[in-house]
Image (spheres, grey):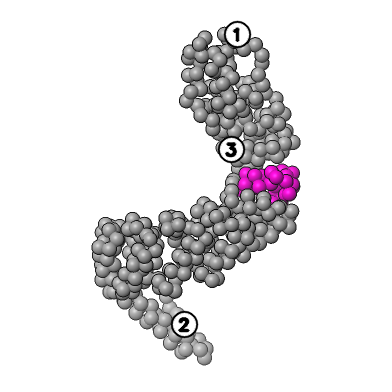
Amino acid sequence: MLVRFRGKGAAVSRFHGFADLRSLYSFKFQHLYSTPAQTHFLVKHLVDSLGFSKEEASLACSKVTSRKSLKNPDLVINFLKQTGLEQTQMKKLVSVAPKCLFYDVSKTLKPKFQCLMDIGLSVSDLVNVIAKDATLLERGLVTHLRPTIDCLRRTLGSDENVVAAIKKTPWLLSFGGHHVMEANILLLKNGGVSDVRIKNLVLKNPRYISQKPQWFKDLMNRVEKDFRVPLDSSMFPYAFHALASQKKPLCEKKIELFKSFGLSHDDVLTMFRKLPYCIALSEVKILKGLSLYIKELGLKPAYLASRPSILIYSLEKRVVPRMQVLKILEEKKLVMRKYALYSFVSLPESKFIEYFVLPYKDQIPDLYEPVKQTPAP
């Protein structure tokens, strides 16, 4: 490609262009001729000091683009040992975050490890969290880690809850910034959501609090306006999570599936307000449940809408076996009354056995067979 230079700055531009190219080729030259030797020594070091296989060590080293002398890796490994990491834990940590071997121990690793352990993360927890998201070691202690932890502590009320949230969603500490979480929490508070429900919402699935505020705001509007669940109601956190767990087109597809079995739009809203999770069920589970309850058993859509929990129970492990037991008892004329499906299916397993199996074990020894392998879902 021919590059033409015009104007007074042509000579300067040309000079800087060639200087940049020279720097680039110099970097490539140094990288090509220094990396193999450095890699060889680092591979050998990992094999000798941490028990890596040669293949494992080579893979770990391939993730490190810049290498210094082996003095720093020795310091890091000694620090990890002093912190209480066993060899298998050090190997796990270095495998996913080999760049940590070249971090400054006193300025970077030790302060960050101490910050995370001070809130209650054990050595084992710390290794697991970093293994799931090694980028948190690259985040600034003062600019990111501490403000994020402080934000979580204010929201969740205790270090124990902060640890629970981090273990569930490790990238909370590295995703992008505490400002996003604070903005979303402010949206909830301005909407009338109590501190207790905010805490429950975050603990249930911490990753949602780190989503973009516009996404968060739109979802709150859907809960309140489209599904008519007040933001200050006890059902709001469950409704929020049910909608957040799936994309809007999929949710709308499931709503149409309910309507195809005769449920009205109001029936769907009634069902959602009673048990938001029913919308989060898989399409297959919804289809099987509606086919059994409405098509085969003839339940009215309104009955199902007012008792949506029967959709949650496993058909194979709970509903069908219990129906088989009831059918046997009716054929033997051992039960004289009709039982409502909801009360029959929703009984705890121990109560079901007590009421419908044990009283008839002498007359029908095999009655227990359909349910003995069917723990409650």
Q: Quadrant of residue 329?
A: top right
| Residue at the spot 51% in from the left edge and 22% down from the top edge | 371
x and y percent of residue 217 in the render? 68, 55
> What x and y, as percent, mark residue 208?
59, 53
Q: Nearer the viewer, mark 2 or mark 3?
A: 3
Q: Main secondary structure of the magenta part?
A: helix
The residue singled out by tag 2 in the image is: 4
Depth check, front residue: 341 or 234: 234
Which label number is shown at residue 281? Answer: 3
The mark that comes first in sequence, 3 or 1, is: 3
**Can residue 216 be seen from the camera position used here?**
yes
Q: Circle 2 — which element?
A: loop
Q: Give the SS element for disc 3.
A: loop
- Magenta residues span 220-244
Could you tell whether 327 is left or right of 111 in the image?
A: right
Q: Secondary structure at mark 1?
A: loop
Q: Amino acid at mark 2?
A: Arg
